[in-house]
Image (spheres, rainbow, N blue to C red):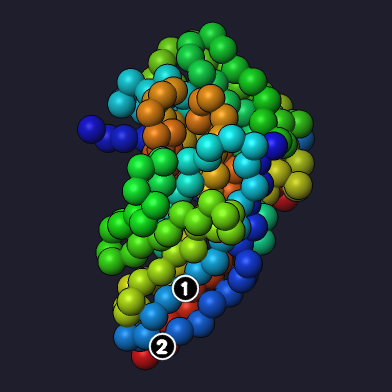
Amino acid sequence: NAGVTQTPKFQVLKTGQSMTLQCAQDMNHEYMSWYRQDPGMGLRLIHYSVGAGITDQGEVPNGYNVSRSTTEDFPLRLLSAAPSQTSVYFCASSYLSGTYEQYFGPGTRLTVT
Amino acid sequence: AQSVTQLDSHVSVSEGTPVLLRCNYSSSYSPSLFWYVQHPNKGLQLLLKYTSAATLVKGINGFEAEFKKSETSFHLTKPSAHMSDAAEYFCVVSDQGYSTLTFGKGTMLLVSP
């Protein structure tokens, strides 16, 4: 199993540009989520999904969109990038029942200039 | 509502000495608790998890944690630090019906020779 994969690993955007961060998992997990990590802040939840066609907002959703058309994929869209969105983004997945252990991707380091 | 407080932002130890990383949590329900480790420029790896079975939980690489409900604590310990333990450690709580995690702000463990 590849686990949770994320692309790209690094990205530089100019203010106002849009882009999509890709996330895929091959563990048949129902739950998928996006976090951003900023120094001294831990990880903060952006959006999450409990299944195909179902998404919801987390703690810091503004400026980001998500959709879930398949179990495997959960892309994160930045509609109009801002310097405040400079961060490291992690995708994670888990089963909906059991121990709630989440599996994390390797992260995408995004810089907005 | 759930929350987690990591009491130290940085902990410095010498190689071969014990490690103690402190975590207190707040939860309205019976929580699941986790410790994750993040090595520099890497993703997050699960060290150990508590899910209402044994209160003393053993994890990978010699780490363990004890769940103390009366103190609402879940401190991480290791008898003897190794240089490779230098990393950032996150205490995480989940008390939702599905997998919504709340992260602490992290503790950076520094290990000197």
Foreground: B68 or B101?
Answer: B68
Quadrant location, the N terminus of chain A: top left
**Kind of residue indicated by mark 2:** Ser
Depicted B72 relative to depicted A99: above or below: below
The answer to whether A11 appears left or right of B26 in the picture is left
Q: Residue at x 31, y 57 (%)?
A: B58
Does residue A62 appear in this view? Answer: yes
Bin the neighbour count of mark 1 within 10 Å (Cα to Cα): few under 14, some 14-19, many 20 and up. some
- Residue B73 falls in image quadrant: bottom right
Q: Which mark is residue B14?
A: 2
The chain letter for the residue carrying disc 2 is: B
Foreground: A31 or B53?
Answer: B53
Label 2 and label 1 in one chain = yes
Q: Secondary structure at mark 2?
A: strand
Does residue A9 appear in this view? Answer: no
Q: Position of residue B100 (x, y in %)?
A: 56, 33
**Kind of residue indicated by mark 1:** Leu
Q: Are marks 2 and 1 in contact (CB under 8 Å)?
A: no
Depicted B76 relative to depicted A106: above or below: below
Bin the neighbour count of mark 2 within 10 Å (Cα to Cα): few under 14, some 14-19, many 20 and up. some
Per the image, the residue denoted by label 1 is: B20
Foreground: B95 or A40?
Answer: B95
